[in-house]
């Protein structure tokens, strides 16, 4: 742990002075830089970054309007949690969420999130989080937040309360043990849920349960709402898959085209 902290401190020095100013707020807590600085992320002003290098991805990120100060949405005060496709807000923000964690974890993602200040919420399956804790901790260190996506990634709809509670609370317990913070948001596998899911999620400490409004895969955004453009409060879903760099970039471009700014879901659901 001491070594990690020392590395983080060194990295902060390395990227501090020359680091470009960022136009938008990412998290309430100051994110710390990744443990492994990548020299290619800071090319000389005249160098053209190689296609799909980290510097290229960073160079493709649009400049966003500054995110408005977050206004947290009202939550039920008793016994239940809301199920949302889209966060009920008029604020000009949209949210990037990344699911699962077991399939692929492109290493460049950590530096990309740091360099481009991309706010991300990670809905993880607890075994993947356990097996690859360092990777997700590094994303956490650059501002990402870990949330709950069950243990076994089984559809919960129609299952007993005890079964659902075991999947949700079991993952929450494990994620809390690994990351030191209990998840407050839950996403059911495949988005499949019933009223028992909402009860169990509540009983396991969740404040809200999220579906999504767009999916992003291999660099393509697929709209699941009639507007075919990202709306305020929209939740974009992608996965820890090999093309995650392309997916992040595609999501950022779609959010920018809509005149919105990416923001962190946890700042709106408190
Ligand atoms: Zn999933």
Image: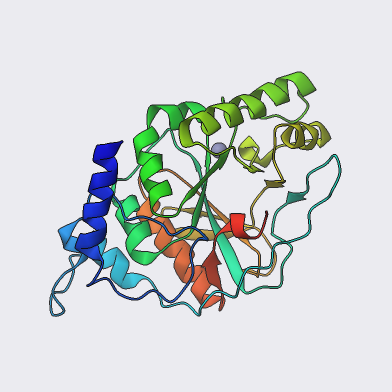
Residue at 64% x, 41% y: name it: 187
Judge left or right: residue 3 versus residue 118. Answer: left
What is the quadrant of residue 269 in the picture?
A: bottom right
Decide which of 96, 26 is in the foreground and name it.
26
Q: In this view of the protein, can residue 229 be seen by the observer?
A: no
Query: Outermost residue, front direction?
Result: 2
Q: Quadrant of ligand 1?
A: top right
Left or right side of 82 for 10: left
Between 226 and 82, the one nearer to me in the picture = 82
| In the depicted structure, whether residue 229 falls above or below residue 145 | below
Residue 249, located in which quarter of the rendered image?
Answer: bottom left
Q: Quadrant of the N terminus?
A: top left
Q: Which percent across, then down, holds residue 220?
A: 46, 59
The answer, for residue 60, to whether it is visible in the render is: yes
Query: Above or below — where is 171 with respect to 105?
Result: above
How many numbered circles are shown?
A: 0
**In the image: residue 140, left or right of residue 183:** left
Q: Quadrant of residue 117?
A: bottom left
Q: What residue sits 60% from the left and 54% below the top?
A: 266
Q: How is the image coloured?
A: rainbow
Q: Is residue 137 left or right of residue 52?
A: right
Location of residue 25 in the rendering, given as x and y in whole percent from the top left corner: 49, 69
Residue closer to the observer: 121 or 61: 121
Q: Is residue 80 above or below residue 161?
A: below
- Measured as percent of width and height from the top left, residue 7 is found at 23, 47
Residue 39 position within the rendered picture, expressed as x and y whole percent measured from the top left = 16, 60
Is 262 in front, or is 266? 266
């Amino acid at each position: 742990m001491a070594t990690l902290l020392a590395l983080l401190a060194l990295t902060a020095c390395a990227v501090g002075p020359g680091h470009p100013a960022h136009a938008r707020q990412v998290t309430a807590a100051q994110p710390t830089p990744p443990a492994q600085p990548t020299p290619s992320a800071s090319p000389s002003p005249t160098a053209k970054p190689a296609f799909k290098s980290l510097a290229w991805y960073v160079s493709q990120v649009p400049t966003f309007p500054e995110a408005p100060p977050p206004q947290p949405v009202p939550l039920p005060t008793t016994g239940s949690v809301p199920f949302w496709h889209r966060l009920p807000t008029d604020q000009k923000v949209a949210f990037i969420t990344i699911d699962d964690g077991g399939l692929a974890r492109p290493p460049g993602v950590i530096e990309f999130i740091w360099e481009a200040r991309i706010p991300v919420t990670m809905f993880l399956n607890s075994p993947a989080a356990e097996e690859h804790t360092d990777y997700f901790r590094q994303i956490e260190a650059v501002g990402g937040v870990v949330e709950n996506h069950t243990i076994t990634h089984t559809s919960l709809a129609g299952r007993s309360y005890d079964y659902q509670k075991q999947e949700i609370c079991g993952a929450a317990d494990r994620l809390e043990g690994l990351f030191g913070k209990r998840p407050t948001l839950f996403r059911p596998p495949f988005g499949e849920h019933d009223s028992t899911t909402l009860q169990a999620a509540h009983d396991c400490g969740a404040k809200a349960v999220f579906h999504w409004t767009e999916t992003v895969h291999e660099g393509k955004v697929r709209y699941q709402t009639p507007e075919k453009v990202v709306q305020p409060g929209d939740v974009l879903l992608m996965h820890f898959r090999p093309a995650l760099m392309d997916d992040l970039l595609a999501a950022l471009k779609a959010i920018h085209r809509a005149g919105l700014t990416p923001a962190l879901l946890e700042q709106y659901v408190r």
